[in-house]
Structures are given as structure tokens and as C-alpha cells.
Image: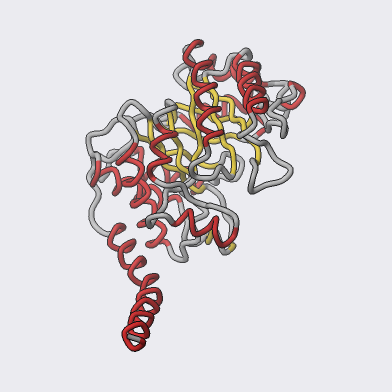
Amino acid sequence: MKRRIRLGLVGVLAFLVMLPGIVALELRMEYAGEVSGEARTRGRDAVWLGHAWVDGRKTDADVAELAKQLDGTGMRDLYVHTGPLEHDGTVPAKVHPRARWFVDAVHRVMPKVRVQAWLGDVVAPEKRPALDLEDPAARARVAASSAQVLDLGFDGIHFDFEPVRSGSRGFLAVLDDVRALTESRQKLLSIATPQIDPLPAVHRVGIALAGQGKYWSQAYFAETARRVDQVAVMSYDTAMPIESLYGGFVARQTALALEVTGDDVDLLMGLPAYWKDAVGHRGSAETVEAAVRGARLGLDRNAPGRQSFGLALYVDFTATPAHWAAYIDGWCTNQS
């Protein structure tokens, strides 16, 4: 019996040693192959914009340049940083004094482009002090803040709360509350989400070992997606060491998200238009080119005819001409 136990433990250890290699091989395979020319922009893309657009640093000339930048792309939505929310869920009007000007300017110069107010904060229990979405009073203030910014003319609300744990009932509740508001005003509700468990229950391991859960379960992702109009997956900061593994990871994330996101919801995959060289983000690996190709592969293999799909560029103030070119050449042109 002891010998069997020892052999069993050896087998488990051998599997754990081989697991990274198995995963790497799978991701390389996800990134291999040709992409159909049909996997191109559907005109439902988005870009995150920094706070400078609403605090007085930008002018009409900047809006005109932005219009030139977006011309000929698939960009339909702008997520402009309008918060952050205070830890109690409020948002002081003084932090976005030029919000109405920006919304009006975009609607005038780019009438087909929608402007969403990007609101968010760090959240409990993983961050302290932080916004507690399990607190009904805090959720009520988040809903009131959403109404406050919609009064400025925004076309919708875009939430980015981090880090929301997989299974959080408070987050679902705030989505329900704000969805009732946005629907009553014929506005949009969208969210930025973490990545989906690349292996079953990985998020539980992170919570158990470090008190932090980087991923969501696929089931929880589905719960959030059905409550909103648009989902943007933050498919970056993956810790992938090389470009092919990162691209394969994005392809896999695209497939996992497509499996549980209804056709009535726009699904967008994030593009890392910034440089960082750290354990969680290797700039040489996490490229816009790899993310675009990975998303196209995932779309082509799993839902080639789906129209409610796009890419979301993060973020305007770090994006270089090379980043924009990679997005346009890889996603917006008619070449295969």
C-alpha cells in the first residue's frame, strides 16, 4: 500500500512538473494556423481614453486630431476616464469639469462615435481602504454617481472595478441596479472584466494561496455578461514570457468568452498598447500584433459569423503610432 501511495505521489509530482510544458504546447497550437479574411473589424471596437479629456487639458484641436486617428478604423466607443469613484461610491463633479464639453465635441465631430463614462475604483476585500460592493449603501451611491454622469450627456457607463472576486454577489447587484438606470434612459452599460480561468478553478488557487483571485470562472463571467450591453476583457498582464504563448492565450480567452457571451452582447478583447517589463507583463511578449492575431484566431474558429465582436485598445496616452498601425493593419484592413 505504501509503495502504491509513493508511486501515486511520484505520478502527481511528475504531472505538476510537466504541466507548464503541456500548457505551453497547447497555447502554441492555439496560435498556429491561418486566419480567415472574414475575421476583421465589425465596426464595434473601442479605446480607453485617459482623464486629460475631461479635466481641462484637452482642446477642440485635440478632438479634431482624435477624429483623424479614428477615421478608417472600427472604433465605435470611447471609454473616457471620468472618475475615479471615491471609496464610498460617490464621484465629485470637480474631477471632470470638462466632461460635458468633451461629450458634446465628440458628438459634433464624430456623430457615429459613442462616449461612455469610465468609472471605477479598487474594491474590497482584496484592497483596503476600498469600495465595498457588498455594502448596499455603497452600491446605491454608485448608482447615483452613474445617474450624475449620464446627466452630462454620456452615451453609457463603463465600469472597471478591480479586483472583483469571481462569484461576487455585490458586483452583480450593482450591475442590476445600474442596468435598470441605463435602460430607463436608453443608455449603455459596459464593463471591463478579468480573464477567465485558463484551467478549471484556477481563481480558487490564487485566493487560497495569496488571498487574491486574478481570474473569473467561466460561469461567473457569463453571469456578468448577461447583465450588460458590452464586455471588454482585459486580455493583458498575463505573465506570458514570449509572443506566441501570449497570442495563444488571447486566442483561448477569446474562445472561452465566446462560449458564454450571448450574441446580443458585444464582446471585445483588450489590446495592450503600452510597454511594461515585469513578471506579470513582458513587453516583448504582450504585443498588439499578437493580441490581434490571437483574437482573430479565436473568433474564426469559434464564431466566424458573429457580428457582436470587437477589439479594445488600452490606452490612448501610451499608445504609439506602431500600436495603432498594428491594430489597423491586423484588424481593419481587407488583407487576410
In this image, 253 relative to 35: left or right?
Answer: right
The image quadrant of residue 317 is: top right
| Residue 265 x, y percent position in the rendering | 37, 28
Residue at 77% in and 23% down: 94
Name of the residue lying farthest toward the right: 94
Above or below 167: residue 12: below
Q: Residue at the spot x=57%, y=36% of the render?
A: 160
The N terminus lies in quadrant: bottom left
Residue 181 image offset from top left, x and y in percent: 53, 15
Image: 144 above or below 262: above
Where does residue 201 sit, x and y in percent of width and height? 42, 54
Residue at x-position 62% and y-position 21%: 102
Tell whether 227 sits left or right of 104: left
Comparing 293 with 225, the one in front is: 225
Q: Residue furthest front?
A: 1
Up/down of 268 relative to 28, above or below: above
